[in-house]
């Protein structure tokens, strides 16, 4: 992924503010706001890593389970027609809706290395 930082399983954005002439970002996939900034990529990365470490330390000190950035569950809204088509597709293959959606996403993100 380009434009995304990673540290200890947490991911963060990389954005630029022309007004402030600073790089900044926020940790993705958790409730609440963990933000960071820097005037160079190296400083931004260091502040991101420190922000994640501080969050994990705070959770440990408070005996709170840290939020996991991605649980593997999310809601998707589609048209009723697409929902019906997916239900028929998955039923005809003996799949659940979840497994059919997972298969479609996997095919979209991880193309077949040996296409026909």
Image (spheres, rainbow, N blue to C red):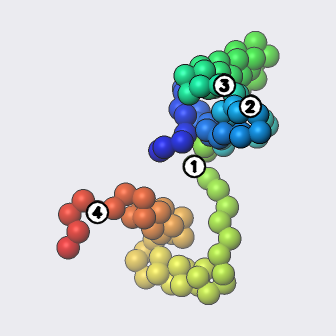
Q: Quadrant of the C terminus?
A: bottom left
Q: Is residue 99 left or right of residue 82?
A: left
Q: Residue 35 — which label?
A: none
Q: Position of residue 15 (x, y in %)?
A: 65, 40
Q: Which label is found at residue 38?
A: 3
Q: Secondary structure at mark 1?
A: loop
Which corner quadrant of the image does residue 108 belong to?
bottom left
Q: Could you say which quadrant of the image residue 75 lies in? A: bottom right
Q: Nearer the viewer, residue 88 or 111?
A: 111
Residue where numbered disc 2 is placed:
34
Residue at mark 1 to residue at mark 3: CA–CA distance: 31 Å
CB atoms of marks 2 and 3 within 8 Å: no
Q: Which label's residue is closer to the chain start, 1 or 4? A: 1
Measuring 71% from the left and 39% from the top, which residue is drawn there?
Answer: 17
Real-space Cα distance between discs 1 and 2?
21 Å
Q: Earlier in the sequence, mark 2 or mark 4?
A: 2
Q: Identify the residue shown where x is 61% and y is 44%.
A: 71
Cα–Cα span, label 2 and label 4: 37 Å
Percent x, y of residue 48: 63, 25
Residue to which mark 4 is pinned: 112
> Counting other residues with Cα less than 10 Å from the Cα at mark 4, is it few (<14), some (14-19), or many (20 or more)?
few
Question: Mark 1–mark 3 contact, CB under 8 Å?
Answer: no
Element carrying mark 3: strand
On screen, 108 above or below 61?
below
Residue 72 has which mark? 1
Picture coordinates of residue 26 (x, y %)?
69, 36
Local secondary structure at mark 2: loop
Q: Residue at x 54, y 42 (%)?
A: 3
Crowdedness near tag 1: few (<14), some (14–19) or many (≥20) residues, C-alpha within 10 Å: few
């Amino acid at each position: 992924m380009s434009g995304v930082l990673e540290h200890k399983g947490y991911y963060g954005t990389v954005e630029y503010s022309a007004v402030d002439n600073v790089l900044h970002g926020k940790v993705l996939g958790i409730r609440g706001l963990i933000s960071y900034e820097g005037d160079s990529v190296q400083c931004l990365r260091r502040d991101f890593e420190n922000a994640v470490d501080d969050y994990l330390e705070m959770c440990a000190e408070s005996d709170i389970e840290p939020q996991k950035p991605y649980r593997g569950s999310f809601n998707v809204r589609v048209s009723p027609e697409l929902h019906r088509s997916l239900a028929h597709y998955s039923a005809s293959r003996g799949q659940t809706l979840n497994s059919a959606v997972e298969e479609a996403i996997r095919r979209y993100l991880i193309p077949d290395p040996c296409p026909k």
